[in-house]
């Protein structure tokens, strides 16, 4: 039994518990404003979704695209639901902070896997197939060459993601 399968049930529980805490915190009545600095609310949103994406990608390592998509939907759903509360409001900035947290967590998960030495083949292959283009890819392709031809861009992304490292 490898380490991934041994800790998977605990990671799933941690992921779902964290989801509940984030949703409850986002929809609970807001007290008086205690802003420590201007962007503290956005930092809380990004941090919460960073943690959610780390836990989600570790718990459901064979389906990273589904986890990422579900977290984007969760962030949007929370913002819509906040519009129906008396003490909360919908903000585009909060949604962008949620998405930023998810993306940072995604990249952190990929970086941790490459640093650990790709012990779990399923994890590394799944995450590599969903990874966004990296700096090495963009340097190889050149600046904005493929953006004018979507088919070429897609084929280059697929070939880069599936290329052996």
Image: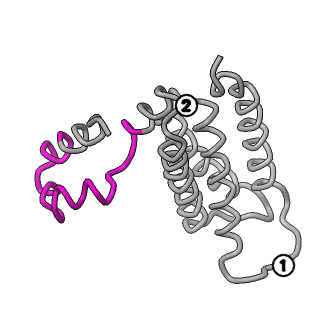
- Residue toward you, 72 or 47: 47
Extreme residue in the top direction = 1
Answer above or below: position of 24 versus 155: below
Give the SS element for disc 1: loop
Q: Residue 53 carries which label?
A: none
Residue 98 place in picture, x, y as percent = 59, 57
Residue position for label 2 = 61
User: Which residues are the magenta region?
Assistant: 128-155
Q: Earlier in the sequence, mark 1 or mark 2?
A: 1
Residue drawn at the location 59% of the way across and 30% of the way down: 60
Q: Nearer the viewer, mark 1 or mark 2?
A: 2
Residue position for label 1 = 34
Q: Does the segment drawn in magenta span residue 78?
A: no
Residue drawn at the location 60% of the way across and 51% of the way down: 75
Answer above or below: position of 31 versus 50: below
Give the SS element for disc 2: loop
- Residue toward you, 4 or 76: 4
Is 40 displayed left or right of 165 in the figure?
right
Looking at the rendered image, the quarter that the N terminus falls into is top right
Q: Predominant secondary structure in magenta? A: helix
Extreme residue in the front direction = 117
Residue 50 place in picture, x, y as percent = 62, 54
């Amino acid at each position: 039994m490898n380490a991934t399968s041994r800790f998977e049930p605990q990671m799933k529980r941690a992921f779902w518990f964290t989801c509940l805490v984030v949703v409850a915190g986002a929809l609970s009545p807001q007290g008086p404003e205690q802003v420590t600095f201007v962007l503290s609310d956005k930092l809380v949103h990004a941090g919460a979704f960073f943690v959610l994406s780390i836990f989600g990608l570790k718990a459901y390592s064979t389906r990273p695209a589904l986890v990422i998509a579900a977290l984007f939907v969760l962030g949007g759903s929370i913002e819509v639901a906040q519009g129906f509360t008396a003490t909360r409001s919908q903000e585009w900035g909060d949604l962008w902070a949620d998405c930023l947290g998810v993306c940072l967590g995604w990249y952190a998960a990929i970086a941790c896997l490459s640093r650990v030495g790709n012990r779990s083949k399923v994890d590394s292959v799944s995450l590599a197939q969903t990874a966004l283009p990296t700096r090495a890819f963009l340097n190889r392709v050149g600046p904005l060459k493929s953006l004018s031809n979507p088919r070429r861009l897609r084929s280059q992304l697929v070939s880069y993601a599936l290329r052996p490292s």
